[in-house]
Amino acid sequence: MKFLNIFKESTLRYIFLILTFIALILSIYNFTDLALINRMTNDDCLWTEHFDENKLFDGLEITNVVPGGNADKAGIKNNDMLIAIDGKQFKTTWEAQGILNSKENKSYAEYSIIRNGSINKVNIYVYKFFNVFLITNFLLGVGFLLNGILVGYSRPKILTSQLFFFLCLSVCLSLVGLEMTAYNFSYINYLAYLKGIGSALALPLFLHFFLTFPYRYEFKLRRSLLITVYVLSSLVIFFKPTSLTYAFQLSFTVFFNIIGAFLLIFSYEKIKDESLKKSVKTMIKGYAIGIISILYLVGITVYFQRANFLINPFWYLPMILILAIPISMGIAIFKYRILDTEFIIKRSLVFGILTTLIAGFYLLLVYIADSIFDKYIGFNKKLITFGAIIVITFTFDFFNKKIRAFVDKQFYKNRYDYRKALLSFSGELPKILTIYELILSLKKNITEIAGIKNLSVWIRDERYAELLRKELTETKTEVQKNLDSDYTVLMEKLYKNNSELVFLNTIESADLEITEKDLELIKAVDLNVTVPIILKNNIVGSLNFSSKRSGNPYSEEDVDLMKTIASQTAISLESSRLKNEEYEKQKIDEEMLVAERIQNDQMPDKNTTMSGLDISVLSQPARTIGGDFYDLIKLDENRILVVVADVSGKGIPAALNMAKVQAMLRFAAKIFDSPAAILKSVNKQIFRRIEKKSFVTVIAALFDLEKKTVKICRAGHNPLLYSTNGVIETLNNKGIGLGLDNAKLFDTNLEEIEMPLNDENLYLFYSDGLTEAMNESKNEFGLDNVKSLLSKFRHFSSTEIRDALVKNVSEFRRTAIQNDDITLVAVKVCA
């Protein structure tokens, strides 16, 4: 019945209550109609409809005249034809019975009969029939119905509760109109069809229930067997009741009752829980007595071979013992507390009586006010009534709530304490910083208030589990069960296709597809109830409750508390994770600031100068720290090495690689006298030390003011932009990035170019973050724009050229986030 679990518990309860109310009304109506209003009147013979050869109604043929009975004493014989009662004619058996039922008890009726072709009128003494069948069936149906609604209402989401409720409902419906439909199927058809539906479902539900409770029988063809039984049994609805179908149903009822009894006995041998064994033993006794009474009924029917109303009611009195079945179920439920229905009944009765007393008090006040004003003051009664309605409307709910709260505190201390516990726990939530603190708070508050032996927490979501493992450095607690593979497998199994609270006592565990090994684990850790912790429709873990210290089962109030705590726990878990993330982010930010300071310290002095050269620099990382860098290495008073490099990647990894390369370049610059030799040396070192996925592009230029030359070497970096005679040119000499290949290939492809230095020459070294800067439309700034700006500002200072580039790139990018590091060095030759 998994389709029912799409509904909420409250919705299922309303559905169960409505179905119960309908079945109860039908049962009472049927009983009242047949036992009081249209109570059957008997004449000690049987009538059967008789038709002539043309299929026309001829009358009622009298058969089964009881020797010594009233019909026999009146001289009525078998095969006489009854055509009228008290002069009233009829066309069916039911119409004739209706005429007879209208007679007073212990009175005479005039029968018009045909015997040997002549009509005779006979006065016959008739009496009201004491229908043991009707009384027994009514009590049996109501007994089942009450047991069913108590169990179904208590645990509407549990399969066994659902099966038991619909079984009891079907049995009740199958007993509605039993006597009536035995006479005529056409009388109040909706009752007859409801009886058919109840009869069709009762037997397969009976088998289904006892294959599931109290021990779940698993076998290969279980599902197919149940579907077959449901389908075959449902076909009975489409057949018109006859003596044959009635006998068929009776035989099936006996058969399934015997099967159910045997299943109950076999289950008793398999289960190990003592409390459950006692309850099952009680039910077995009840069923044994019930089956004996059914067999007795079959024996009486076979022995007398006549309608039940032609047999002395005294013979049927033992069939009342069939009531032992619902009575034994009730005892098993209440005495051994299979389900906590006691609380529901007690609370319903108390609050029902309380509300009635409050309403009665208001009515008494209205009556007194009405009497006083009418007698002594003479006010208009309509005005008094209107005023009383207003007073009741605005004050009834207020006083009703106040008195209920008082009763809660005095008589339902658990509920009152639970509210206090929730308030206390809610107050602690903002102060809880870690998951471990959350678990300790849960154990402290819930175990004391709810009176449970232990509370453990299972964490399913790896984000929270990892965070918890970090917190558990030395303390060992129940949360260590998260590391237990069997425990985790069990919990995963429970919540594989389920997002509802699960009761793991022996009764409801029959609904779950778990193994004997799982049951042993449940018993070993004393796991009684598990409640899912749900966050954003995902199960991130569960709260697992042991049994109560008192030994009492969990009540509806307990369940409400568990669900509320689980909901708050989900929020607290996420809050702890976010707080941890915030803390970690704060740590990372602090570390990044430190790294930024270190990186800035490694950068050369921006005020580095060289006579004859106007130099300006810029380093603008996309993140706090970047992978681009520039360097101005002053070799002597006439020579300076300008370097711009771009390390693949971003953030800390790129910064670390950058530091390595920068240190190697500075070291090599002291030994070698050309950019090519410097880069070749660095590549040999870095090829072995840098990750294979990383590489470094570099452009290095050695300005020699004494010789008036500049040597330029490019290892896969952006081409140099320079101006000669007012024209912006691009230098595309060969070279591959550092760390991409060994010395042989790198050295072969590295090209060094020497150029003369002239006044007003402009050189721009830059990283791709300048030309590939993007705006909101993902368009790049481009090399042409850079050339255009250099051409426009070539007569300006290097600082003004740098600022113009930065300003134009910023205006181009507008609100778009900087996508890459921007590094540039502008060098202008001056006199």
Image (tube, rainbow, N blue to C red):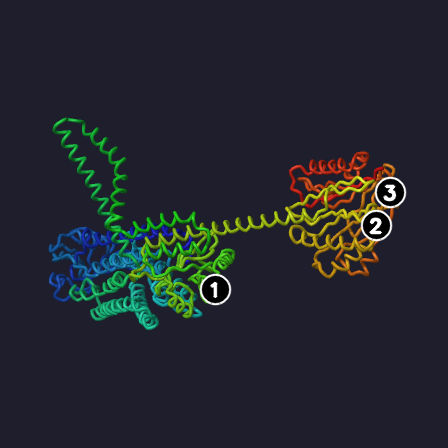
Q: Which residue is mark 2?
A: 733
Q: CA distance from mark 1 to mark 2?
A: 61 Å
Under tag 3, what secondary structure?
A: loop
Q: Is residue 652 left or right of residue 829?
A: left
Q: Is residue 199 visible?
A: no
**Which residue type carries mark 1?**
Leu
Q: Is residue 795 left or right of residue 251?
A: right
Q: Determine which quarter of the picture holds residue 389.
A: top left
Nearer the camera: disc 2 or disc 3 = 3
Which of the numbered marks, if any, corresponds to residue 483? 1
Name the quadrant of the N terminus.
Answer: bottom left
Under tag 2, what secondary structure?
A: loop
**Which residue type carries mark 3?**
Leu
| x and y percentages locating residue 359 in the rendered image | 22, 41
Q: Earlier in the sequence, mark 2 or mark 3?
A: 2
| x and y percentages locating residue 332 in the rendered image | 27, 63
Q: Determine which quarter of the picture holds residue 320.
A: bottom left
| x and y percentages locating residue 553 in the rendered image | 31, 60
Q: Residues within 10 Å of mark 3 (few under 14, many from 20)?
A: some
Q: Earlier in the sequence, mark 1 or mark 2?
A: 1
Total numbered labels? 3
Residue farthest front in this picture = 637
Q: Residues within 10 Å of mark 1 (few under 14, many from 20)?
A: few
Q: CA distance from mark 2 to mark 3?
A: 18 Å
Q: Which residue is mark 3?
A: 757
**Which residue type carries mark 2?**
Asn
Q: At 67% from the left edge and 54% from the top edge, which residue is drawn?
A: 656
Q: Earlier in the sequence, mark 3 or mark 1?
A: 1
